[in-house]
Image (spheres, rainbow, N blue to C red):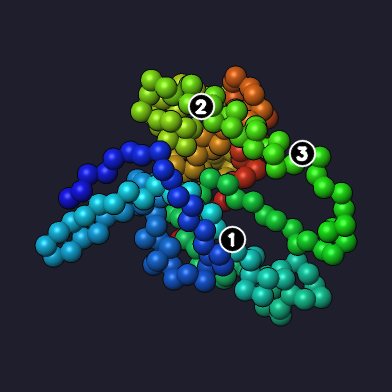
Amino acid sequence: MIPHRRTQNIGVLFLDELPEFQRAVLDSLRQPIEAGVVSVARANAHVTFPARVQLVAAMNPCRCGHLGDPALACTRAPRCAADYQARVSGPLLDRIDLHVEVQPVSAADLVLDRPAEGSAAVAERVAEARAMQSARYRDASARTNAEAEGDLLTGHATPDEAGRALLAQAAEAMRLSARGYTRVLRVARTIADLAGAGNVGRIHVAEALSYRRQAPRS
């Protein structure tokens, strides 16, 4: 067995048309995403490789891609969307921190002015947030909020009273799993870092919750 050693290197795994992959293949990613390693077992050997990746996935709301457009949607809508999205299991969705719905871009949208905050400004904010996290965890086993667990995470990401109340309500309403609850805390802490805030507040928890969808039953 090859021991896994923590490294600064991390890759990006991009899966386009996520539901088109076989469900068994997608579910095989669950443990590597959680543990950062992938194990290959054979008759005479059991080898473990580092597999720390940032998973990015894209999918249409349904197979035809026109859900919500009466002129273009298929005759099976909205049932087709439910069937299509169910091809991705709830446990896998539970391991994805940010769920973002992107509206279709029309030709008219392309002539609009560019957003006020460009990529360079966003990159600068991200770099500042990363530096903040490096300083926060300099004496810990984690390097970023994504790696913080247990007491380390709660010590740095526990929201204020209003934020805790909102998170408790959302945990019940959205039926958050323990994993989902932890991931909301990590995202909220990162949102606070991007805003330059020392503490996690209700506004940061609210935004983190907006990026989380209720996972379908498997």
Residue 139 place in picture, x, y as percent? 38, 20
Q: Which residue is mark 3?
A: 117
Q: Are dots 1 and 2 in contact, CB under 8 Å?
A: no
> Looking at the rendering, which quadrant does residue 40 occupy?
bottom left
Residue at 48%, 21% (x, y): give it.
Answer: 135
- Residue 122 numbered mark, or none: none
Disc 3: CA contacts within 10 A as few (<14), some (14-19) or many (>=20): few
- SS for dot 3: loop
Mark 2: which amino acid? Gln
Asked whether the viewer can see residue 66, the reply is: yes
- SS for dot 1: loop
Point out the tag, 3 or 1, that comes first from the N-terminus.
Answer: 1
Pick the residue in front: 195 or 203.
Answer: 195
Point out the tag, 2 or 3, that comes first from the N-terminus.
Answer: 3
Residue at 61%, 40% (x, y): give it.
Answer: 209
Asked whether the viewer can see residue 168, the reply is: no
Real-space Cα distance between discs 3 and 1? 24 Å
Pick the residue in front: 117 or 193.
Answer: 117
Disc 2: CA contacts within 10 A as few (<14), some (14-19) or many (>=20): some
Q: Which residue is mark 2?
A: 133
Mark 1: which amino acid? Ala
Residue 120 place in picture, x, y as percent? 69, 39
> Looking at the rendering, which quadrant does residue 172 occupy?
top right
- SS for dot 2: helix
- Residue 58 numbered mark, or none: 1
User: Closer to the camera: disc 3 or disc 1?
Assistant: 3
Mark 3: which amino acid? Glu
Left or right of residue 106, residue 167 in this image: left
Residue sitting farthest toward the bottom: 75
Image position of 115 with respect to 89: above or below? above
